[in-house]
Image: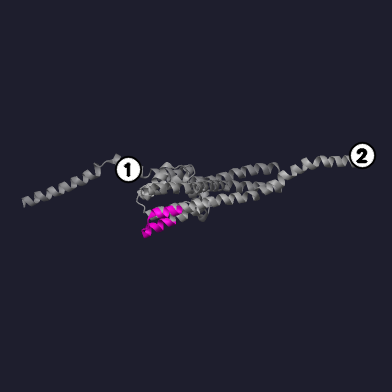
Amino acid sequence: MNALVIIGATLVCGSTGFVVWILFAYDKKGLNAVRANLTRGFESTGVQGRRNLGVLYQIGKRLTPEGYVKKLDRLLALAGRPATMPLNRLLAAKPTLALLGALLAFVIIRANPTSTMFLLGMFMVALGYFIPDLLLYSKGQERQQAMQLELANTLDQMLISVEAGLGFEAAMARAGTNGKGPLAEELVRTLQDMQVGRSRRESYLALAERTSIPELKSFVKAIVQADSYGIALSGVLRTQAKVMRVKRRQRAEEKAMKLPVKVLFPLLFFIFPVLFIAILGPAAINTLNTFSSQ
C-alpha cells in the first residue's frame, strides 16, 4: 500500500507540475512573433486598413451593391492589385470624391443657378463617384495590353529553355526572373502559388482568371490539358509559341489596316478645311474684288 500511494502521489505531482510548466514556461515572445508574421499582410490590408478608413469605407460599402463590389475586385485583379489601392481604400475613395464633386457643384450652382449648371453639378457628382473605377479600368487595360505584347517573346524564351533541358516550371521561373513587366510578375506569382501548396492545375487556372487575354487563356487551357493527359509539354509549348507569333503578326496587320479609317475623320474635319482656305482663299478674295470694282 505504501508503494502504491507513493507511486500515485508521484504521478499526480508530476502531471500537475508538467501542466504548470506548459502553461507558464512556453516561449511567449516566439509565439507572438509567429502570430505577427502570419497576420502581417492581412492586418495591413484588411482590418487595420478598415480601421484607418473608418466611416468612409462603411459608407462606400453600403452605397456599392455586392455585385458591383465583385466587379471592382475583378478590375483590381486585372490591374495587378496595386498595393496603393486595395479594395477597401477604393470603396472609401468613391464617396469621398463624390462629396468633393457635390461641394464643387454647390459652389457652381450657387454662383449661377440655372438648369444647365444643375445638370453640370449632377454630372460632376457622378464623375467623382465613378472616376476611381475609370482609372482602375484604364490601368487594367494598359496592363493587359502589355502582357499581350510580351506573351510571344516569353513563350519563345520558355521554349528555348525547355529545349535546352529545363523542366516546364524551371523554364517558367527563368522567364519570370529574367523578364520585366506584368507577365513576368504573373508567372512568378503562379510559381509562388505552387510553392505554398496549391496544385499545378489550380495555379494555372488562377493565372487565366487574373487576365482577360484570349491567347493567354488558350495557352493555359492547353497546358492544363497536356498535364492532365500526360502529353509532353515541349511540343505543346512549341505549338503555342508558333501560334502566338502568327497572332502577333495578324494583330499588327489589323492595326495597319485600321489606320486609314482612323485618319479619315481628322483629315476631313481638320486638315482639308485648312487646305481649302489656303488654296481657294486668295482666289475667292480676288473674285470678290473683281465683282466689287465693276
Residue neighbourhood size for the residue with mark 2, other residues' Cα within 10 Å, grouped as few (<14), some (14–19), many (≥20): few
Asked whether 230 falls inside the magenta stretch, the response is: yes
- Residue 42 on image: x %, y %: 40, 45
Picture residue at 53% right of the left edge, 50% below the top: 249
Tag nearer the camera, 2 or 1: 2
Question: Which residue is tagged 2?
Answer: 293
Secondary element under disc 1, as helix, strand or loop, is helix
- Residue 71 on image: x %, y %: 51, 53
Q: Is residue 27 left or right of residue 276?
A: left
Amino acid of disc 2: Ser
Q: Nearer the viewer, residue 139 or 35?
A: 139
- Residue 59 on image: x %, y %: 52, 48
Structural distance between the alpha carbons of marks 2 and 1: 99 Å
* Display colour scheme: one colour
- Can the viewer see residue 192 in this picture? no
Q: Is residue 139 left or right of residue 121?
A: left
Q: Is residue 20 left or right of residue 108?
A: left
Q: Nearer the viewer, residue 125 or 203?
A: 203
Residue 34's tag is 1
Q: Residue furthest bottom?
A: 229
Secondary element under disc 2, as helix, strand or loop, is helix
Range of the magenta residues? 221-240
- Can the viewer see residue 278 in this picture? yes
Residue neighbourhood size for the residue with mark 1, other residues' Cα within 10 Å, grouped as few (<14), some (14–19), many (≥20): few
Q: Nearer the viewer, residue 280 or 186?
A: 280
Q: Main secondary structure of the magenta part?
A: helix
Q: Are marks 2 and 1 in contact (CB under 8 Å)?
A: no
Residue 286: name its quadrant: top right
